[in-house]
Image (cartoon, rainbow, N blue to C red):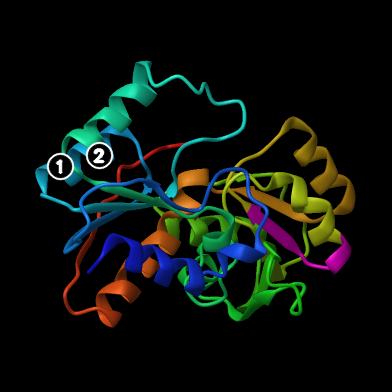
Amino acid sequence: MKNTDLETYINNLLKVSLFKDYAPNGMQVEGKSEIRRVVTGVTASQALIDEAIRLGADALLVHHGYFWPGEPSALKGIKGNRIRSLIKHDINLFAYHLPLDAHTHLGNNVQLGKRLGLTGVAPIESDNPECLIFHGYLPEAIFASELAEHISTALLRTPLISHQPEQKIQHVAWCSGGAQNYLQQAIEYGVDAYISGEVSEHTIHTARENNVVFYAAGHHATERYGVKALGEWLQQQFNELEVQFIDIDNPA
């Protein structure tokens, strides 16, 4: 498959043109024109690149690529090493950030909801394709500590929890990654709990004072499943592609 054809397909699938993002979505580093073997992963770290090289990948598909605001533009240090490794081995780098968070079939948020076994999973703004906050329902109301255990089992990471009120939880909202600042929107939507990947000091006070339980379940842990689902989808759509997900674990 042509690298440009793969980029066009994913761009259209994820509706990239609708998003104003922090970094470019699509092909960030151009490699060989023909793609057969694709490695997927959360972040284009050196460890993931090394795995792609070892596996003879023609393309690396990630959620976190390069060229973020405030990132040094010079190709030296770890950035230089990473991009040099890709170019030396003729590996294409594709990265999709907010479009992969928001996609209602393959995205990080819908996949996180499925992973947690929630029902009625949907964006809180159903008519907004850029909406990043999703919500859903547990099969039955449970205590905050029980939801923490459930998250730990599902994501293989023990979450931080803001507090443990007496009332049970059933209606949950979430946004993967570093989305703790969306807590107030979730509170206004009327949920019992909110899950994200990261936490700030003020997040805990906001959660406690509104009696909405907040869980920080890990940036990496909450964003494993979108890029994995995207890779599996590509494998199903294009028989000529061989796709493998590699999880370079990160406790953050």
* Helix, strand or loop status at disc 2: helix
* Residue nearest the observer in this picture, 168 or 116: 116
Quadrant assignment, res 243? bottom left
Q: Residue at x 48, y 74 (%)?
A: 13
Mark 2 neighbour class, 10 Å CA radius: few under 14, some 14 to 19, many 20 or more: many
Residue 179, which numbered label?
none
> What is the x, y in percent for residue 153?
42, 59
The part of the chain drawn in magenta is 188-195
Is residue 153 among the parts visible in the rendering? Answer: no
Name the residue that disc number 2 marks: 49
> What is the x, y in percent for residue 173?
69, 65
In this picture, residue 177 sits left or right of residue 246? right
Name the residue type under label 2.
Ile
Whether tag 2 and tag 1 are in contact, CB under 8 A, the answer is yes
> What is the x, y in percent for residue 51?
18, 42
Residue 53, which numbered label?
1
Q: Is residue 18 above or below residue 204?
A: below
In this picture, residue 8 sits left or right of residue 18? left
Q: Residue at x 25, y 74 (%)?
A: 235
